[in-house]
Structure formats: C-alpha cells, structure tokens
Amino acid sequence: MARLFRWLLRLTAGTILLGVAAALLVYFLAAQSLPDYNKEIALPGPTAPVEIVRDNANVPHIFGSFGASDEDVFFGLGYAHAQDRLWQMAVMRRTAQGRLSEVFGVRTVKTDSFLRRLDLYGTARRSVSAQSPEALSALKAYAAGVNARLQEINEDALGRGAPEMFLFNMPIAPWQPADSIAMMKLMALQLSSQLQEEILRAQTSIALDDPARLSDILPDVPGAGTATLPEYTSLFPELNGLTLQEPQVAALMPVAPRGLGGASNAWAAAPSRSASGGTLLANDPHLNLTAPGAWYLARLELGTGGVIGGTIPGIPAVLTGRTQQMGWGLTSSYLDDQDLFIEKINPDNAQEYLSPNGYKDFVTRPSIVQIKGSAPLTLTLRWTENGPVLPGSLFDLASITPPGHVVSLGWTALSETDTSLTAALELMRANSIEQAIAAGEQFIAPSQNLTLVDSDGIALKTIGAMPERDLRNQSQGRLPNQGWRRENRWQGRLPYAANPEFIDPRGGILGNTNNKLVERPFPNHVSYNWGDTQRINRWRRLMQAREVHTRDSFIEAQLDAVSYSAQTLLPLIGADLWYAEEAAPEGTRERQRHIALSLLAEWNGEMNEHLPEPLIYASWVRALQKRLIEDDLGPLSDAFSRVDPLFLERVFRDVDGASAWCNVQQSAPTETCTDMARRALDDALVYISEKYGSRLETLRWGDAHQATQDHEILGDVPLLRHFVNIRQSTSGGDNTLQRGLTSGQEPEPFNNVHAAGYRGVYDFADPDSSVFIIATGQSGHFLSRYYDDMAQFWRRGEYIPMSLDENLARAAAVGITRILPRQ
C-alpha cells in the first residue's frame, strides 16, 4: 500500500510539474510577441530615420527626422499599429475578405457568405486607383510599415506577433493599400442600420392586424409629419398570412443588431460662448465594446503640422482629433444610404430578373469558401443593376420575400470609386473649417456628421454620399421596393451641397447626438430613421444652463448620466400608482411595490452605478414594453429587445389611439394602461428578486450594468476569458449622454455593450490642455500592461492629456523606437 501511495504521489507531482511546465512554455511563447518599444532597428521602407516616441500612456508620437517625408510618418504609424494590434488587424481584414472560416470553421460560414456576396473587398481593390496620388502614397507607405513589422517578427522569431497566433493557424499575407480601404468599408457596414430597419418595418407591417399601429411601435421622430406609407402587403400581396420567425444573427457577423449601429455625441462652442475665449469641441463616438477596443490613440507629425487623436488599426488616418489649428469630431448621421429591392425572377429562366427594360441576366460569379475541418462551400454570387443579391436566410429576408423573387441591396459603400480614405487624409491636413468641409466632399461611406472648430468658428457638415431617389418612389426608401420599377431605383448621387450644413450659428453652440437634424421633404429628407431622440433634450438643457462653457463643463456634459427618458416616462406610467396603496406587511408583493414606487418618486433620473433606482426603472419599462407588444407581434416582439421611450410615451399619452396597445387581444377583459403598468412593475420586481435580491434599497445598477469589453474570439473560452475580458461596473444607460447601451438579451439584459470607446475634449484657447481617453488600452496583447491600463480611467470619467508638445512626450516616454532605412 505504501508503495502504491508513493507511485500515486509521484504521478500526481509529475502531472502537476508537466502542467506548470506547459503553462510556463505557453507564457514564454506568448510573451515573445510583446513588442520592445525601446530600440533602434533598420527596416526596409522609410527613406529617412523615423522615431516613435511613446508617452507615459503608450501613445505613439511619430516623427520623421530631417529629410523625412509624410510617407515616412505613415510608415511609422503602420509599424506601430502592427506592433500593438496585429491580431485585430488580421481578423478585420479576413472579415472584409470573407475568409474567417479558413481559421474558425463552420461558425463563421454565414458571415463569410454575406461578405462574399457584398464583394466588399473586391470593391476596395477596385477603389485603389480612385485615390489621390498623395493618398495612394500614404496607403503604400502605411502598408510598408505593417509589412516591415511582419518581416521583423519572422526574422527575429517574435512569437508570431500576437499570442492568439499560437491558438489559431492564421497565416498573415503582406498588407496592401486595398486592405485599408476595406477597413473603412467594414466600418461603414458596422455603422449602417437602414437595411435592418427596412426588414423590421416590413415584418412588423405584416404582423400587425391594425396597420395604424405601425407608427406607434416604429415611430417617426417628433416634428413635421411625413407622407403616409403603403402597407407592405399592398406592394406584395403574396405575403399575407406569412408566419414570422425570430431573426438569427451569425457569429462574428459585422452587422450590428438593431439599436447597435453607430451612435455618438459631439458639440462645439464658439468663442462668444466660451469662458476662455477660444472654441471648444467635445466628441465621443459610440461603438460595440470589445477588448481590445476599436480605437487606438496616435500623434503624427506631418509636413502641415502635428495631428493627434483616435485612429482605427488598419486605417492610416486620425479619424477624430485635432491639430494646432483645428479639431473635428464624428457622429453617425443615420443617412438613408441603403435600400432593399425585391427582384422578380423570370419564371421561364431563373438566370434572369426583371428590369425596367425587360428581363436581364444576373451578373454571376462562383466563389469558394474554404472551411477549416469541413468541405469547402461553393457560392454562386449574383448581382442585379440595383446591387448584390442576398440569400433569404440572411436577416430572415425570406419572411418578406414573395415566391419567385429575390432581394438585392443598394448601398453607397459598394462604390468602386470610393474616395473616403482620400477625404480622411485631406481632413488631417486642413487648417480651417472651409478646407475641412471641402475635403469632406470626397467622403462616400460611412456617412457621418462632421463637427468642426477652428480658431474662431464652429460648423457641422454631414459627409457621405446621399442617394438620389425619384419623387415617385413607392415607399420613399422605407420599405423594400419593387426593383423593376424605374421610379424605385436610385437616380445617382445628390450634390454635396444638399448634405446638411450648419456654420457659425447665432447661438454660438451646436451639437449632435444622432438626433434628427433637418426636416426636409422627400427625396431630400436625409433619413426617416434617426438615432436616439432623447439625449438631445438633456444636452440642450445642459448647454442652455450656462452662458459660457469651459473644457470642464463640456467634460461634465460628456459624462452626464441623467436619463431624460426616465424623467419623462415615470410620471406617465406611474401616474395612478404613486402611493395608491397603504404600506403592506413586509415581504408581500404590495410592500415591494410600495418600496419601489417610493424610491422612484424621489429619484432625479440619474443612472448612477451605485443607485438602486436605475435598475428598478430599467426592469419596469422593459417588462412594460414586453407586455404591451407580445400579444400583437408574437415571436417578432423579440426584435424589439430594448425599450423605445417614444413608443411608451405615445401609448401612455394615447397619441392617435396608441393606448390600444394596453389591451390584451387574447383576453376577455379590457385592460387599461394603469393595469399594464401595475402588472409590469410586479413582473419587474419578481425578476429583480430572483436575479439580484429582494432588498431593493441595497441594489446597485452597476452590478447589472457591467461594461462587457470582451475578446471577440477568446472571450468565451473557459479560464482564458478571465485574462482577456475586461468587465467593469458602469453608470449611464440607453438614453443618457454618458451612453451605456444595454444588451436587451437574456441572461444579462442590462449589460453595457455599446458605449463611448473614445472621448476627447479640445480647448483651442489652450490646445495642449485638451484631453482624451479610450475604453481599454493601446495594446491588443493581453499580457501587456497596456492592454487595459486606461479602462479604469475611462470608467471613472478621467482623461489623459492631448498634447502636441514634443518635449512633454519625450520627458515621460516609456520607450523610443528609432527606425533606420535598411540599405
């Protein structure tokens, strides 16, 4: 027995030692890919020495030595991006190419199929020749910098460049100028939402028994009305009685679910409204939260001067930031730049579709998707004159497609002469609002609102191609249209002058929170589907509360967590419930209801992570919307996973008979809106009790509202996820200026999944006092100290300096890389 025990002990000890040795080996190999920021190296590509000075936040300041060109600086940016975000860049490029399944297997086949059908990468390749000579030189220099890092990794055995490369066999081809253009197009896809809105509007039109109720559940933004739309089934009667299913989204699909498209805040103050006498600008673009984040901070010293701000790895441009003379910020414009077309197939020849001039052949091309661990999949890609044909399985398109028809997509980003990157590069060199607006004319997609300030002026200009539609368009681009009718087709692009523009407004302040910008008749309407309608009300109140503003007051507004929606909705839905019942015995449903209403009655609407009221409010309105729509929409109600304040307000104010939603059609009694509010509150309290605890006073919104900055590939891997994911308690909510959009999906419907990955505030009275921050860190390497070092600053609402002072960057540098031309 003693001998057996000794052998078991030896085996156990040996197993533990082997496990430790394996872990140490993995750690050693992964650590090999950590970049050395303090070195001198000779690389092919630059024409003169380049210095990358990394300040104490690991922000690279890239300088060319005497005799260096702007191309040498772009080389340095490509090298820095590849040092810190190589894996991220490689995955994004494969996404655009439709080649994820070569690495990740069957889970990404649907994504690859979608991107192949769009031919996003093909349009990027064909757009290379459309760039200006200066832009093409910058793209080539940037690519050379990325490739120099790849060569260094191979020559010096630097751990394959990223730890993920040891887990996935993903060869990396040399970077090309087309890859950067494809990154911009992929960004456009991630920020677009019109396609999903058209599908949902068509599905909802089919599902509702009363067509008048469509304007309740998918309300127009308040303001002047628009022309009445036809019912979708009147355009396609074959769809009457169709059963709708819950839509499915593929893994790694680069199209945001409804509500998770682009969002952002930006506002500016003229010198007359600034305490310092200089212009002010604040910007915080909102994107899906991931680790690493989308943004990467950088400073470039170009021939026209220094430029600093937020870049996207893979794209050689500062997309939001400032120079010494000018600052610019981005917000999603919600421009209606996508349309779905229902195409009629020739019943006698399935290779033809109907056009205004008769039947025409589809343009077709085979495409083979290689799948790791499975047989390859051969796709037949098809295009019509309106755009690429999409399969019925995608976004549940089959539910809105009549028999004998297919759906094609018209989208401005599919342009083969896309000069958006040229525009972005010219914007960095602009030194006045006029020059910046002129540069924006070449921007195609994604459409953005460009907020601008220079030394004495402020402006806002919508950039991006606006499709020109016929005045006779059947659905005004709001529903999928009959693609064979000439009046439904795009007529080209509207002139750039038609894009909304505001320069030096009399009030001295302008801003955008994705709200409705203009009310113009179709077809100059810009959009019918705008972003958040609530944040702008809170912003207006904060801006008007002061005669003059400062950098700090702009920061205060950027971090404001008061919900205008909560302040508006609670008096409506609780109007007949406040203190309607006397205090009941402890532990009873009535007692819980009384406590909840008492807390909410004293609450100012601040979605503070340390308070219980935001969780009670969010659970109540979520349960209320669910009760209101489930019996009318059935499975489709799952598509409305987040609360729409406009819908609830219409119902409880009974706008145009909207209170009809309160009555449950399948029940004999007639329910009132007060009944529904009471029942929904009880639902919410039961849900809270089961998930978070029954003592309402001790709840914390932040425990439910966790920022989910997860690694997109490794985030679900047991054990490893604890190293790669960043989770933090956060304030804010769906409709606050400090936006923290909730997931809306079980099991964690209040997780913060979409927020400001970048924040910047610039004061041009003292430009070097400007500040910025990103949500995670500069590095994409989870063993790096810079992987998540900014996350706590971001959560607490803190910033780091945005200085163009070279001496400050050098004084606290964590490393200086000197790149010499290799002879």
Image: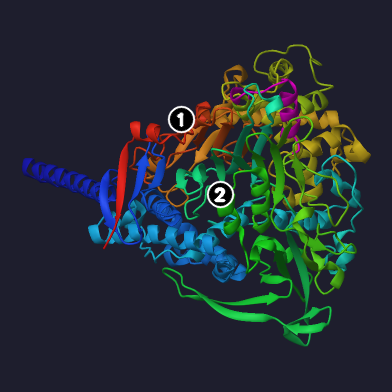
Quadrant where the N terminus is found in the figure: top left
Q: Is residue 519 left or right of residue 418?
A: right
451 w.r.t. 377: above or below: above
Q: Which residue is mark 1?
A: 792
In magenta, the rendered stretch is: 533-553
Q: How many marks?
A: 2
Residue 552 in which image quadrant? top right
Q: Main secondary structure of the magenta part?
A: helix
Residue 768 point in image, percent of width and height: 50, 30
Residue at image position (66%, 25%) is 274
Describe the element under mark 2 as helix, strand or loop: helix
Q: Is residue 660 left or right of residue 479?
A: right
N-term mark: 2 or 1 = 2
Residue 803 point in image, percent of width and height: 47, 33
Q: Tell me the tag on residue 429.
A: 2
Q: Is residue 692 left or right of residue 82?
A: right
Amino acid tagged 1? Gln
Residue 193 point in image, percent of width and height: 69, 53
Q: Is residue 513 at all visible to an observer of this figure?
A: no
Residue farthest toward the front in the current orientation of the protein: 67
97 w.r.t. 73: above or below: below
Mark 2 or 1, closer to the camera: 2
